[in-house]
Image (cartoon, grey):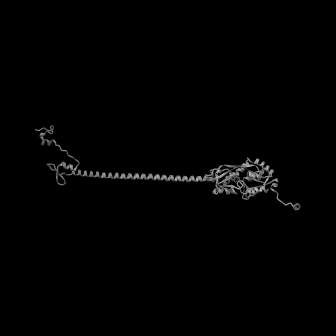
Amino acid sequence: MLLFIQKMFFREVLTVFLLAVIGMPMQPASASESSTSGLVKAAVLKNFPPQYSTSKDGMPQGFAIDIIEEIAKIAGFEIEYVIKESWEEVFEAVKSGQADIIPNQGITDVREQWFSFSLPVETFPVSLFTRTYEKDISSVSSLFGRKVAVIRLNVGEVLMRKQSGVLVRTYDHIQDALFALLSGNVDALIFPEPVLWKLARDAGIEDKIKVVGQPLIEILRSVSVSKDNTALLNKIDAAVRTLVGSAEYQKIYTKWYGQPKPFWTTQKVAGFMTALIILVVLFMGSWRYLTTIKLNKALKENIHKRKTAEIQLQKSYDTLEQKVEERTSELQKALAEVKTLSGLLPICSYCKKIRDDQGYWEQIEIYISQHSNAEFSHGICKECAQKHYPDLGLFPNEFKPD
């Protein structure tokens, strides 16, 4: 072991000496040299979800990262990541040879002048976004005099250069542009549609924005390689043919872009049930209140009818009582008269007049008429007719004059 260490030390000293003698500086291997040895350096953005982001431990992650990892596995090379803060730094890293590839970026005419591009790994539309309740913007032609957000070096920035009269606001990060739209600092935002929808869903604001009109352009995204690295590009193309359309590709795509959230989320169901319970409680309360009012009204009507009936009954009772009293009085008076007539009546034994209470003598028929309901009609009996009017023959069959 000691001999091995001595040999290694001697070798290092000799190497340094030779380099010093021939005047060659010591430099690390370039990215192109590392790629030929099985290690590929990838320049990635620190934060551009869902393509690029960093985990809590500082490791890159995202759709582009998972895609390039699968490509590397198929092509047989390893990936070393060079994390940058902006797209300018990412592009410069490949141009300067610090990195070999950019895992996933849109293909544009300008970028094709800088890099070689592999076969596409995804395709998505670039669309015009507005706030959900915006009604005045219906297409790109409606943007005259409007403030439109774009991302620096993104295809949206290129598209807006061709539109006159549009007030372009350039942002370094999509999150800043999105919240500028929501806050009203800009009127519209141009950005790749699937990426923005993913960001909106993750932030829980997908109901705050909408796509207006048809997509402005469809962008192909692929792995960009430095211009002079044809061998690496061929390896990546072969791996892309194998990966795209496979079950693993679909798994990665679903993982990072996901599916649109269903309309009936847990929160919406809970909110709906709460609102439904409140409506049911309000309905039952209103129904009970209205029912109580109706019952009270019916009860008041019944009470009124009962009181009216009682009043009428009382009146009838009073009338009946009055009539009973009157009738009783009449009967008592009649009874009194009957008692008077049934008592001892002083009557003249010759003229048959009756003496009243005042001591006057009255004809018997007058007295009885005054003290009873009896009325008299005058006639003549046969004895008196024979006695007083024998010549008139009033009762011929009864008697004959001598």
Quadrant containing the N terminus in the rendered view:
bottom right
The spot of residue 400 in percent (x, y) is 12, 38
Q: Is residue 66 visible?
A: no
Q: 273 left or right of 111?
A: left
Q: 110 left or right of 380?
A: right
Q: Is residue 361 visible?
A: yes
Image quarter for residue 84? bottom right
Q: 391 left or right of 289?
A: left
Quadrant containing the C terminus in the rendered view:
top left
Q: Is residue 14 above or below residue 255?
A: below
Residue nearest the viewer, comparing 257 with 338: 257
The spot of residue 272 in percent (x, y) is 59, 52
How many marks can you see?
0
In this view, the residue farthest toward the left is: 402
Q: 247 left or right of 336?
A: right
The spot of residue 339 in percent (x, y) is 23, 51
The spot of residue 324 in percent (x, y) is 30, 51
Q: Residue at x 40, y 52 (%)?
A: 306
Q: Is residue 244 above or below residue 97?
A: above
Q: Is residue 360 above or below residue 391?
A: below
Residue nearest the viewer, comparing 193 with 276: 193
In this view, the residue farthest toward the front is: 164
